[in-house]
Image (cartoon, rainbow, N blue to C red):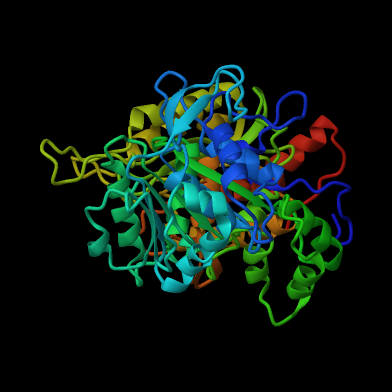
Amino acid sequence: MDDDEVPDVIEPFTLGPTWKRGADGKFLLPEYTLGWHALAWTATYLQHYAGKPWRYTPEQARLTLWWYAMDPVTNRFLWRDGVVQRLKGWGKDPVVGSWGAFEFVGPCRFAEVADEGNEWGVPPGQPLGQQHPAAWVQMAAVSQDQTRNTMTLFPGLFTKRALQEFRIDLGKEIIYADKGRARIEAVTSSPRALEGGRPTATYPNETHHWLESNSGHEMAAVIERNATKSADGASRTLAITNAFEPGEDSVAERTRDAYEAAEAGRAADTGLFYDSLEAPPEAKLTEAWIEPTLKAVRGDSTWLDIGRLKASILDVRNPPSRSRRFWYNQIAAAEDAWLARYEWDACKREDLALADGDEIVMFFDGSKSDDATGLVACRMSDGLVSALGVWQKPVNWPSPDTAGYVPYQVPREDVDGVVTNAFGRFKVLAFYADPGSGKDDDGEMYWDTYLDRWGQTFGKKLTLRAVSAGPKAHAVRWDMRDRRNQETFTDAVKRTHEDVLQRNLVHDGHKVLRTHVINARRRTNAWGITIGKEHRESARKIDLAVCMIGARMLRRLVLNSPKNQKRSTVRGKGRVVVLR
């Protein structure tokens, strides 16, 4: 699509239940939620700065309903902590302020199930709440300026009725109610000072600024521990953030990584609520795209001046990465990132999938324990890349100091089964396998026995052999430590990068493959730009990205091979196009 070709309707990229729709096209709402009581209470006791009764936008109301969703059997909240990520100016502070007020003196804990004709107008069968007897609400940040945005809202947020009925004593940093039994406070002190508290609700502010250097990570850990040990098990934290700067290792970045790891099945689902409204991957920073994209990304926050935002984006003094973060709410890319998330996501095709009998090529990257082991296929007909398997140490694997500790090793038999199954399902034209550097207990290369078996079993079926002649001739063994192979792979990195940017590559959206691609960093070698981890000891794996690049490389090699050209001519498929 050209820069000036904008879709008639721009669909934003969304995360979270707030954006899910039913078969009728309407937004889905939770079946059982204290949010109905929250909507009614805030409309009664809170006000906008102009003195008008508090009203959420439809988007904010859905967000409230979902954040307060409960299990109808246990009457406990579904989510233990959460994140709301929006563009600047959306109104995160006022919304969090209203929830903080509800937790402060509102009916924020389950009391009973509503019946017909209840005074709050809550639908029958939905939960009604009661006030917490000792509410302790914290507005947390790593600087005083960050908490000030929310704390300064409260004097104008409560109505006169609320101030009188709950005996609220407004203060600049601590607000009390009911003669001190309830309080809201701004916390920016050291993590050690926070340790041991028992807040009933905590709202970390602007977690994209919470870094190791300003004790943000330690503060986040203390807040999580304090919430976990709450007496009623209902203390929760909800963070608000803009899109983070990748590579800074902020709390916001770690949280998004944890959410995506759970979504990909690489980590346990611990009840993390994540809600985000972002520009679609294909959105460009051109004049034709900016206005319709901003209208899609702002959601219901119609008060945002699209013209001013557009001028800021077009201002050449503002880096594109900053505009994408602040106004498109997109997570751009680290300075040395190989690809940005939105660039890879723009190539996703959910309607495509490998089918039995497809002609494919496969690339395997082996390891023993530390790195991941991966297998990726690329379909010959359209270049679709699809991960067939990935094996890496589970995040909850015991540490070495655990009693009875057993080091993790990639299960070779499982990998062998996946490889064998692939040869049974598809017509594999080429299969390169990098053995890695790990050794088994006998001092032999960890994967050599399997590579030899695969070569002997499947080698005759392959159009292309990994090493065709010489003492190291092998049907599948392709050692990436070989300098000639490094040069070939470096060229493949360049070509694959170009294919992604030009939308000439398609993938099926495999979540772990996406993570590994995002983790990949640009690295320079003797032949140009290749990829590597952010640093040698990094836990952020890139092995499936290596396999993906290798599979694309193999497709190109097969298409250009004499055997394939002869095969194509015999089949009468027309002229041969050589990929250079």
Residue under the image location 77 percent in, 29 percent down: 25
Total number of numbered discs in the rendering: 0
Whether residue 478 is visible: no
For residue 16, side relative to residue 499 (left or right): left
User: Does residue 354 sit above or below 575 in this rendering?
Assistant: above
In the displayed orientation, state which residue is furthest to the left. 403
Q: Please tell me in which quadrant of the rendered image residue 35 appears.
A: top right
Residue under the image location 55 percent in, 33 percent down: 37
Q: Please tell me in which quadrant of the rendered image residue 19 appears.
A: top right
Residue under the image location 34 percent in, 32 percent down: 412
In the displayed orientation, state which residue is furthest to the bottom. 317
Whether residue 483 is visible: yes
User: Does residue 540 sit above or below 430 in this rendering?
Assistant: below
For residue 540, side relative to residue 441 (left or right): right
Name the residue nearer the viewer: 410 or 569.
410
Q: Position of residue 108 (x, y in %)?
A: 45, 38
Name the residue nearer the viewer: 338 or 140.
140
Name the residue nearer the viewer: 492 or 574.
492
- Rendered-image quadrant of the C terminus: bottom right
Q: Position of residue 409 (x, y in %)?
A: 28, 38
Q: Position of residue 78 (x, y in %)?
A: 45, 32
Name the residue nearer the viewer: 510 or 111.
111
Q: Position of residue 79 (x, y in %)?
A: 45, 36
- Rendered-image quadrant of the N terminus: bottom right
Q: Please tell me in which quadrant of the rendered image residue 447 appears.
A: top left
